[in-house]
Image (spheres, rainbow, N blue to C red):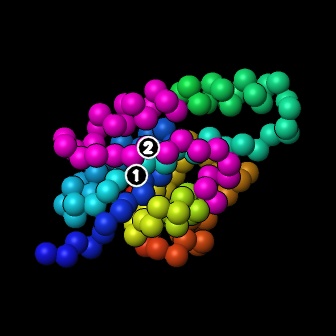
Amino acid sequence: METIFSKILVAVDGSPLTNKVLGTASDLSRLSRAELHLVYVVESGWAEGDVARELAIREMEEESDRLITEWKKMVSPGLAMTAHRMSGHPGNTIVNLASDIGADLIVIGSVGKSQVERMLAGSVSTFVVTHSRIPTLVIKP
C-alpha cells in the first residue's frame, strides 16, 4: 500500500498550541508510516556582537533543548523523530528545511507564542503557506 506522506515536518515554537500541533503530526506520521521531523527555530534578528543578544540566544538554545526532549516523549510510541534546532527567520527556515529534507507535508500552528510578535513580524504560518511548494496543514486552537 502506497502512503500519502513519506516525510512530515512539524514546526513548533513552545506556544500553547504546540501540543496539539505535535499530536496531529505524530498521528499523521504513524498512520502514513512517514518519517517525522520536528523543527524549532530560534529567531536571530538582533545586531551582531550584541552581548545581550548572545545571552538571549544561549538561553533560547538551552530552553529549546529542554523542550525538544519533552516533545520527543510526546510522539507516538515507537515513532522515530528527528529534531532540528535552527536559527534564523522562522518562516524561511521552515520552508528551506522542508525542501532540504524532501518533506511532503508541513504541519504548523496558526498562532505563535505572541500576538505582538505576529503583529511586528507577520504570521509564520502565513509565510509558510505562501512560500512553501508543498502542502501545509495549519492547526487552529
- The number of numbered badges drawn on the structure is 2
Left or right, 46 with reference to 39: right
Q: Nearer the viewer, residue 129 or 112?
A: 129
Tell me the SS state at disc 1: strand
> Toward which corner of the image does residue 53 lie, by quadrant?
top right
Give, as a three-letter code, the residue at label 1.
His
Residue 63 coordinates in the image, percent (x, y): 53, 27
Magenta segment includes 1:
no
Residue 26 coordinates in the image, percent (x, y): 28, 51
Magenta segment includes 85:
yes
Q: Is residue 21 shown to the viewer in this render?
A: no
Mark 2, residue position: 83
Q: Are dots 1 and 2 in contact, CB under 8 Å?
A: yes
Q: Nearer the viewer, residue 80 or 51?
A: 80
Residue 67 coordinates in the image, percent (x, y): 45, 31
Q: Nearer the viewer, residue 116 or 8?
A: 8
Left or right, 125 with reference to 87: left
Q: Nearer the viewer, residue 15 or 92?
A: 92
Quadrant housing the N terminus = bottom left
Q: Which residues are magenta?
A: 64-93
Mark 1, residue position: 37
> Toward which corner of the image does residue 45 lie, by quadrant?
top right
